[in-house]
Image (cartoon, rainbow, N blue to C red):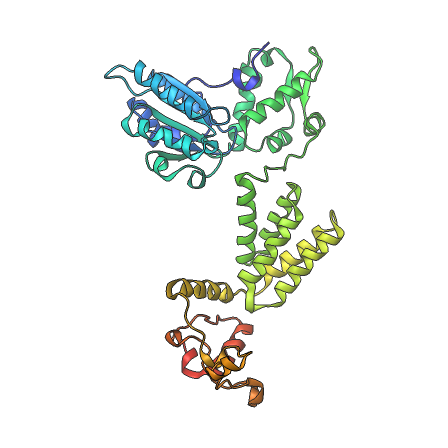
């Protein structure tokens, strides 16, 4: 049985390697290390199909050093120790350290990652890890500190086009077929910058066509062959967090066009509408806050509407809330206020409640002075009278600071009028 096209076309040298010029192009840091014949341990972080495994194999071939591979999906601590022991026994004195390549290193447990530390630190192996997830969250700090981190990018359209032409002109099987690349947009859209996926797609299109027929690759043909949503993404993966981050930051930055774009990306990607609605409610409280309290009401109403009407109509209240939040004035004074209060509580501990504002449900409590001296604000003009509400040791603390939006200025002015010097910034 023939190898898959992606395997047949896997480059053997850096000159054949497509993309990642910032890492392996002439004069780049990693290229200089490879050409010098000495590399330190590093982790390759990037989306699927951008050449992480291929780059590790090319480096091992170039350095002419033993190359061991482990998959974090199928390997345990024992497998790690076995490979380290094998590398240690098989190494000669002046040879470069064997390379241990661990695919999907983010799936290794803490104990599995711990088992690598000594070997990496002593130079028994040179570790090359590959991950699609942010190493800051998935790789233990001691291991991360012993490795360089190199970020790989999704392949650009030019890179994919170059790879596609190489496939149809150089592959031992495809070059024997009559293939005309009339349209490539669908190929690139479905592959999403993933070289392996691109080659799998073109191979599928070719194999589904009679051997002697001319294959005219069009967007329609590719869509018919695949029958899938090209914009779907892993809801547990990094793109899930990147897109929701872009969505919230666009709202916070008052860009309704960008916010609607990222909303559309999530809808087309099959995101849970309730997840989107929850984030809108959070954004309304965190980023719009007291500058426009109606934002929280509208976001909450959008959440209710989505639950009641479902898809596809649910996109409309989500869009309405998105535009309203993005175009609203912004304030995070409530968000900063509660965080400041929490920090104060953690720093100062359980301060006693002033006697005047304590509850006094029993005679004994009243005799002890609970509630004594409390002044009922509604008995005074303007429903306000100054009295102490903070604990004795914190009476000079300021927690909430009004911000400069028209709505919040009114709130601040009222506090200034009530409390005078205490609220002067």
- Asked if 85 appears above or below 406 in the picture, the reply is above
Q: Looking at the rendering, in which quadrant would you find the C terminus?
A: bottom left
Tell how many labels: 0
Q: Position of residue 72 (x, y in %)?
A: 47, 27
| Residue placed most toward the observer, 401 or 368 | 368
| Residue placed most toward the observer, 158 or 108 | 108
The answer to whether one can see residue 15 in this image is: no
Q: Residue at x 53, y 64 (%)?
A: 330
- Asked if 57 appears above or below 340 in the picture, the reply is above
Q: Residue at x 53, y 85 (%)?
A: 384
Q: Position of residue 109 (x, y in %)?
A: 45, 33
Q: Position of residue 2 (x, y in %)?
A: 58, 11
Outermost residue, left side: 94
Q: Quadrant of residue 394?
A: bottom left
Outermost residue, front side: 364
Q: Position of residue 129 (x, y in %)?
A: 41, 29
Q: Looking at the rendering, in which quadrant would you find the N terminus?
A: top right
């Amino acid at each position: 049985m023939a190898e898959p096209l992606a395997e047949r076309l896997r480059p053997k040298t850096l000159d054949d390697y497509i993309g990642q010029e910032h890492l392996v192009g002439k004069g780049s840091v990693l290229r200089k290390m490879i050409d010098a014949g000495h590399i330190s341990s590093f982790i390759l972080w990037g989306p699927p199909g951008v050449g992480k495994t291929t780059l590790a194999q090319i480096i091992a071939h170039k350095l002419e050093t033993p190359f061991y591979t482990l998959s974090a999906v199928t390997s345990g601590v024992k497998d790690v120790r076995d490979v380290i022991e094998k590398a240690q026994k098989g190494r000669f004195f002046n040879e470069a350290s064997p390379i241990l390549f661990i695919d999907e290193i983010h799936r290794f447990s803490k104990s599995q990652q711990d088992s690598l530390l000594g070997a990496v630190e002593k130079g028994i192996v040179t570790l090359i890890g590959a991950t699609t997830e942010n190493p800051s969250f998935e790789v233990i700090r001691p291991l991360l500190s012993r490795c360089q981190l190199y970020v790989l990018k999704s392949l650009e359209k030019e890179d994919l086009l170059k790879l596609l032409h190489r496939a149809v002109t150089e592959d031992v099987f495809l070059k024997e077929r009559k293939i005309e690349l009339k349209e490539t947009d669908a190929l690139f859209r479905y592959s999403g910058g993933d070289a392996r996926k691109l080659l799998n797609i073109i191979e599928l299109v070719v194999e589904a066509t009679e051997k002697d027929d001319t294959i005219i690759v069009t967007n329609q043909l590719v869509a018919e062959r695949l029958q899938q949503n090209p914009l779907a993404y892993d809801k547990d993966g990094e793109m899930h967090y990147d897109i929701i981050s872009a969505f919230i930051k666009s709202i916070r930055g008052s860009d309704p066009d960008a916010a609607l774009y990222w909303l559309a990306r999530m809808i087309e990607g099959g995101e849970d509408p309730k997840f989107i609605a929850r984030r809108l409610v959070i954004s309304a409280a965190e980023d719009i806050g007291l500058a426009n309290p109606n934002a929280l009401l509208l976001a909450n109403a959008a959440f209710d509407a989505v639950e009641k009407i479902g898809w596809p109509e649910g996109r409309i209240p989500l869009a309405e809330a998105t535009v309203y939040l993005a175009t609203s004035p912004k304030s995070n004074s409530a968000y900063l206020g509660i965080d400041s209060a929490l920090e104060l509580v953690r720093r100062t501990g359980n301060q006693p409640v002033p006697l005047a504002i304590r509850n006094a449900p029993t005679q004994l409590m009243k005799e002890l002075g609970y509630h004594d001296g409390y002044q009922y604000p509604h008995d005074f003009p303007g429903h306000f009278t100054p009295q102490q509400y903070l604990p004795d040791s914190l009476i000079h603390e300021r927690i909430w600071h009004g911000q400069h939006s028209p709505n919040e200025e009114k709130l601040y002015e009222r506090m200034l009028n009530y409390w005078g010097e205490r609220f002067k910034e």
